[in-house]
Image (tube, rainbow, N blue to C red):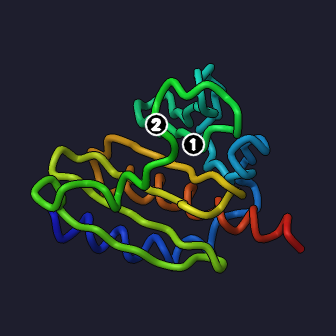
């Protein structure tokens, strides 16, 4: 099972280029991520960061937290922390990092089936963390296929 999940993670990077143009777009709050059919974006209320989730009625939920506290704002929590990088090695199944559209991406798959994906430099002065409880290889592929469209959307806006 572990080998299948690792294989799915690697093949998802290449499959990213094959997302159909019928994929739905989340709003600019999370960089215009291309959602797969059946998924929807839900904005939530955060105290000191932008939070929300991407949900599928079948159960998969991807949570996100856009960190970085504005200058002069009251700090209730911490600032952005690159969760995949900061995860203790004893909790990891694997950790990978890659450049996608010129942006660093850090991905950690934990022993408790949590997938952490971080874009530490995608938003000026902020970073973004995504997390999802991944139970099957198909869920792993869905999460990676959607989230890896994030830096592409950001790069397109810079042009």
Between discs 2 and 1, the one toward the N terminus: 1
**Circle 2 SS class:** loop
The location of residue 49, given as percent across then percent down, is 60, 33
The circle on residue 67 is 1
The location of residue 157, given as percent across then percent down, is 85, 64
On screen, 71 above or below 82?
A: above
Q: In the image, 89: left or right of 130?
A: left
The quadrant of the image that shows the N terminus is bottom left
Q: Residue at x 38, y 76 (%)?
A: 10
Where is residue 158, by image quadrant? bottom right
Q: Residues within 10 Å of mark 2 (few under 14, many from 20)?
A: few
Q: Residue at x 63, y 51 (%)?
A: 126
Q: Residue furthest right?
A: 159
Where is residue 100, by image quadrant? bottom right
Q: In the image, 45: left or right of 1?
A: right
Q: Residue at x 44, y 49 (%)?
A: 81
Q: Residue at x 74, y 41 (%)?
A: 29
Residue indicated by mark 2:
78
Q: Nearer the viewer, residue 120 or 41?
A: 120
Q: Residue furthest left?
A: 90
* Total marks in image: 2
Q: Give the alpha-carbon distance from disc 2 to disc 1, as whole Å.
A: 8 Å
The quadrant of the image that shows the C terminus is bottom right
On screen, 44 above or below 49?
A: above
The location of residue 107, given as percent across then percent down, is 38, 63
Q: Nearer the viewer, residue 42 or 30?
A: 30
Where is residue 54, by image quadrant? top right
**Circle 1 SS class:** loop
Q: Residues within 10 Å of mark 1 (few under 14, many from 20)?
A: many
Decide: marks 2, 1 in contact (CB < 8 A)? yes
Q: In the image, 95: left or right of 50?
A: left
């Amino acid at each position: 099972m572990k080998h299948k999940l690792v294989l799915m993670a690697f093949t998802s990077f290449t499959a990213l280029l094959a997302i159909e143009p019928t994929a739905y777009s989340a709003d600019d709050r999370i960089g215009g991520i291309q959602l797969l059919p059946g998924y929807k974006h839900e904005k939530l209320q955060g105290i000191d960061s932008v939070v929300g989730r991407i949900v599928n009625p079948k159960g998969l939920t991807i949570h996100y937290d856009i960190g970085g506290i504005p200058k002069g704002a009251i700090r209730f929590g911490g600032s952005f922390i690159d969760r995949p990088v900061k995860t203790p090695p004893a909790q990891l199944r694997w950790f990978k990092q890659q450049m996608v559209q010129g942006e660093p991406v850090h991905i950690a798959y934990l022993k408790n089936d949590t997938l952490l994906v971080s874009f530490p430099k995608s938003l000026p002065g902020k970073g973004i963390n995504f997390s999802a409880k991944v139970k099957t290889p198909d869920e792993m592929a869905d999460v990676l296929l959607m989230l890896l469209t994030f830096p592409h959307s950001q790069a397109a806006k810079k042009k």
